[in-house]
Image (spheres, helix red, strand yellow):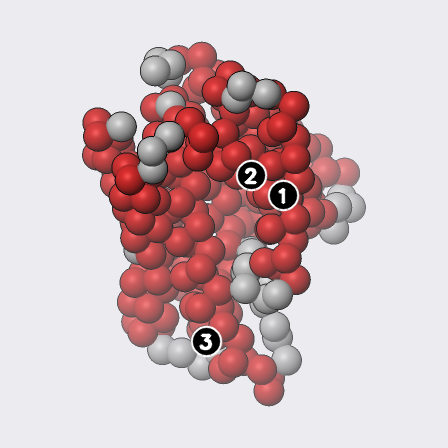
Amino acid sequence: MGSMLIPILIGSFAVSLVAFTGVLVLILKPETAKRFSFYFISFAAGTLLGVVFLDLLPEAAELAGNPESIFWYVLIGFLIFFILERSLIWYHCHGTNSHPSHRSQSATLILIGDAVHNLIDGVIIAIAFIADFKLGILTTISVALHEVPQEIGDFSVLIYGGMKRLKALVLNTLVAFTTVIGAIGLYLFAGAAPDINALLVPALAMVAGGFIYISAVDLIPELHHETRTGQIFMTSALFFLGIAAIYLVGQILPHQ
């Protein structure tokens, strides 16, 4: 497991750098940034489901002595993410509050929610790398893609809340690096665990449940807001391309 520390650090650091995609809000026109984010939502939804059914669940089933038990953990993972979102802790790409009296409060809550979100992302990345190097790479890709539209949305909320652009960029970047903290924390915890497989099986299955929630409940419904034929075709194509990309990358990467 010691050999996985460097990939875990690189993966979590790379995902943290996705925070800089929020700068697109400043560079591009608002409509262009929104459209850019919308396309990433389609692709990210596909990659998340691809990782779940092509990698996370097969890996958990392979490690589990009783494969049937993983379905309970998938359900638990799904419910955990549901509770987090319903408690207003989890902030996704569409979680913004535009009412003027709540702008400043929303900016603060976005930073708090994003910190929790990124900690969990770091934990997810570390779990995946500890289980298998290939799974770690695929999970990192999926998490990073999911972060792009969220960071664009979060950065927009910070600016809309009255925060200066430089301050918003600095704070958003600092919060993003809690991903690394979550990854290191999980790595140290796993190193102290007497039976790593006993930890990995439920962890992988719960991550799968969380990814299903994000894709099916959080991202895919966003796509249904678009009713233009051309856009429907484009977003559907990107969704399937996301699944295909995970499959193809999985065939290329080595299995350890």
Query: Does residue 198 appear to the left or right of 89 in the view shown?
Result: left
Marks 1 and 3, how far apart at CA: 29 Å
Q: Which residue is denoted by mark 1 in the rendering? A: 76
Task: Tell me: residue 79, above or below residue 69.
Answer: below
Amino acid of disc 1: Ile
Precedes in sequence: disc 3 or disc 2:
3
Q: Which residue is denoted by mark 3 in the rendering? A: 108
Precedes in sequence: disc 1 or disc 3:
1
Query: What residue is at 62 percent from the left and 36 percent from the top?
Result: 74
Name the spot of residue 1 as percent of width and height, x first.
27, 28
Amino acid of disc 2: Met
Q: Which mark is residue 206?
A: 2
Whether the residues at callouts 2 and 1 have beta carbons within 8 Å, the answer is yes
Marks 3 and 2, how far apart at CA: 29 Å
The part of the image, by quadrant, that contains residue 215 is: top right
Amino acid of disc 3: Thr
Q: Assign a secondary structure to mark 1.
A: helix
Q: Looking at this view, is 65 or 8 the one in front?
A: 65
Name the spot of residue 169 as percent of width and height, x first.
33, 66
Query: What residue is at 40 percent from the left and 78 percent from the top?
Result: 163
Precedes in sequence: disc 2 or disc 1:
1
Name the spot of residue 36 as percent of width and height, x first.
52, 48
